[in-house]
Image (cartoon, rainbow, N blue to C red):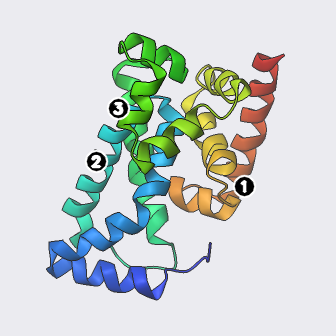
C-alpha cells in the first residue's frame, strides 16, 4: 500500500463531506479489509458485522472533520475499527470460538452455513477457520495486554508495515517496534 492517500480516496473523502451518498464508495472500497480485521480480532462473525457497521457509521459521522494528509484513509478506518474492538473487549472479553463451536451454539449444521453463505460469509469463515493453529494463536493473543494485541494483529494478520501500524495507532515507529517485540515475546511464552 502506498504511504500517501490515493487520488481516488482523496476525491471520495472530499465528495463525502458534502454528499453523504459519496461515502458509499469509500464503504465499498474498504469494507472487506476492515471487516476481515475485526473478524480476525474478535473471532465472532456477528460481532464483526456489528463492529464493522459501527466503524463505518462513526466514519460517516466524522467525515467532515477528516483532514486529508499523507496517511491513507484506510489508516483512519483501521484506527476507528481498533477503537471499536477495544470497546468490544472492555464490555466483556470473550475467547474466540471455532466455526464448529459457533455453528453448534447456534444450532446450525455445516450445510446451513453454506446455504447462508454470501461471498462475505464464506470469506469470513475461511479466514476464521484457516487452521487450528490460527485459533490457538488467537486465543493466546487474547491473554496478552491489548496494546500488544493491536500491534501484532495489524502487523501480521493485516500485513501492515511498521509505518502503517504507527499511523493507525498514532504512536511513534520506535514504540510500535518495541510493543511488537515485547508482545511477540509474551505470545511465544504462552504458546510454549
User: Mark 1–mark 2 contact, CB under 8 Å?
Assistant: no
Q: CA distance from mark 1 to mark 3?
A: 35 Å
Can you tell which of label 1 and label 3 is closer to the viewer?
3
Q: Which residue is mark 1?
A: 174
Residue drawn 78% across and 40% down? 181
x and y percentages locating residue 175 in the rendered image: 68, 50
The kind of secondary structure element at disc 2 is helix
Q: Quadrant of the C terminus?
A: top right
Tell me which label, 1 or 3, sits earlier in the chain. Answer: 3
- Looking at the rendered image, the disc whose residue lies closer to the viewer, 1 or 2, is 2
Left or right side of 166 for 60? left
Where residue 103 sits in the image (x, y, percent)? 43, 18
Query: What crowding class fits label 1: few (fewer than 14 Cα within 10 Å), some (14-19), or many (20 or more)?
Result: few
Question: Which secondary structure lies at badge 1?
Answer: helix
Tell me if I can see residue 87 in this picture: no
SS label for mark 3: helix
Q: Is residue 126 visible?
A: yes
Q: Mark 2 highlights which residue?
A: 53
Q: Which residue is located at x 67 percent, y 55 percent? A: 159
Upstream in sequence: badge 3 or badge 2:
3
Q: Residues within 10 Å of mark 2 (few under 14, many from 20)?
A: some
- Image marks 3 and 2: residues in contact by CB distance under 8 Å: no
Quarter of the image where one finds residue 166: bottom right
Q: CA distance from mark 3 to mark 2?
A: 11 Å
Q: Nearer the viewer, residue 80 or 178?
A: 80
Rendered location of residue 53, percent (x, y): 28, 47
Residue located beneath label 3 in the image:
46
Mark 1 and mark 2 lie on one chain; the one further toward the N terminus is 2
Badge 3 local density, few (<14 within 10 Å), some, or many (20+)? few
Q: x, y percentage for residue 121?
A: 43, 41
Amino acid at each position: 500500500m502506498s504511504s500517501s492517500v490515493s487520488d481516488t480516496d482523496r476525491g471520495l473523502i472530499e465528495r463525502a463531506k458534502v454528499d453523504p451518498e459519496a461515502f458509499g464508495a469509500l464503504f465499498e472500497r474498504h469494507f472487506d479489509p476492515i471487516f476481515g480485521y475485526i473478524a480476525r480480532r474478535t473471532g465472532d462473525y456477528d460481532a464483526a458485522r456489528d463492529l464493522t457497521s459501527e466503524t463505518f457509521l462513526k466514519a460517516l459521522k466524522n467525515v467532515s472533520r477528516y483532514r486529508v494528509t499523507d496517511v491513507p484513509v484506510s489508516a483512519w478506518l483501521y484506527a476507528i475499527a481498533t477503537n471499536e474492538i477495544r470497546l468490544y473487549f472492555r464490555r466483556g472479553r470473550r475467547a474466540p470460538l471455532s466455526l464448529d463451536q459457533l455453528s453448534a451454539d447456534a444450532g446450525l449444521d455445516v450445510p446451513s452455513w453454506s446455504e447462508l453463505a454470501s461471498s462475505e460469509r464464506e470469506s469470513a469463515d475461511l479466514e476464521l477457520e484457516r487452521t487450528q493453529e490460527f485459533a490457538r494463536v488467537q486465543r493466546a493473543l487474547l491473554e496478552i495486554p491489548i496494546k500488544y494485541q493491536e500491534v501484532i494483529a495489524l502487523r501480521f494478520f493485516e500485513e501492515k508495515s511498521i509505518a502503517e501500524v504507527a499511523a493507525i495507532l498514532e504512536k511513534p515507529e520506535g514504540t510500535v517496534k518495541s510493543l511488537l517485540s515485547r508482545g511477540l515475546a509474551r505470545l511465544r511464552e504462552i504458546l510454549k
